[in-house]
Amino acid sequence: MNKGVALIGGVGLGAALMYMFDPDRGKRRRALVQDKVTAAGHKAEDLAGKMTRDVRNRIYGTAAEIKSLFSHEEVSDDVLVARVRSKLGRLRVHDGALNVTANNGIITLRGPVLTDVLPGMLRSVRFVRGVRGIDNRLEVHAEPGSISGLQGTAQPASAS
């Protein structure tokens, strides 16, 4: 069995060598193979560069997040409202029906909200950088019913 495999391998190697070193077309074939190897090298180099940048950016982002945990920056109320609205836009919440205001780091939430999304929404708002507390003045409803702000399917901004 091993002799048969060796024989077939030898015949295949011989055929490949004949194909590559053919006096008529061998030079062209070798040039094509060289071009493909060079192109593959360039693709590998590009991929390595992308991976390096990705890892560097992730490390930078993680370091910035850790640094922000230990710094207590003063954030203007307008910036805080924008951060909270941005966070709400990523959740399955009817955020267009919500009124968000801030006063010295305390976020006031007003408007209709469904019972099943309330805990996750409050948790997400609580962990927005700069929020010191939440004044919950939301109208909680078990079902949308006839409340116009709760009609349709709430989808995060990334879903559209």
Image (cartoon, grey):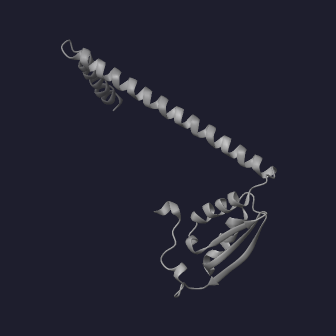
**Quarter holding residue 149:** bottom right
**In which quadrant will I find the N terminus?**
top left
Residue 42's place in the image compared with 59, above or below, is: above
Report which quarter residue 23 is drawn in.
Answer: top left
**Residue in the image at 63% along x and 37% along y:** 56
Query: Residue furthest toward the top?
Result: 23
Where 104 sits versus 40, above or below?
below
Q: Residue at x 25, y 22 (%)?
A: 15
Left or right relative to 50: residue 134: right
Between 43 and 103, the one lying in front of the other is: 103
**Hey, which residue is sitting farthest left in the picture?**
24
Q: Position of residue 90 (x, y in %)?
A: 57, 63
Q: Position of residue 158 (x, y in %)?
A: 51, 60
The answer to whether residue 20 is above or below residue 51 is: above
Q: Is residue 60 left or right of residue 54?
A: right
- Quarter of the image for residue 117 reads bottom right
Nearest to the observer: residue 103 or residue 118: 103
| Residue 10: x %, y % from top left | 30, 23
- Residue drawn at 25 percent across, 14 percent down: 27
Residue at image x 69%, y 68%? Answer: 101
On the image, the x and y values in percent for residue 144 come to: 54, 84
Q: Is residue 43 above or below residue 34?
A: below
Q: How many marks?
A: 0
Q: Quadrant of the C terminus?
A: bottom left
Judging depth in this view, the residue of 69 and 5 nearest the camera is 69
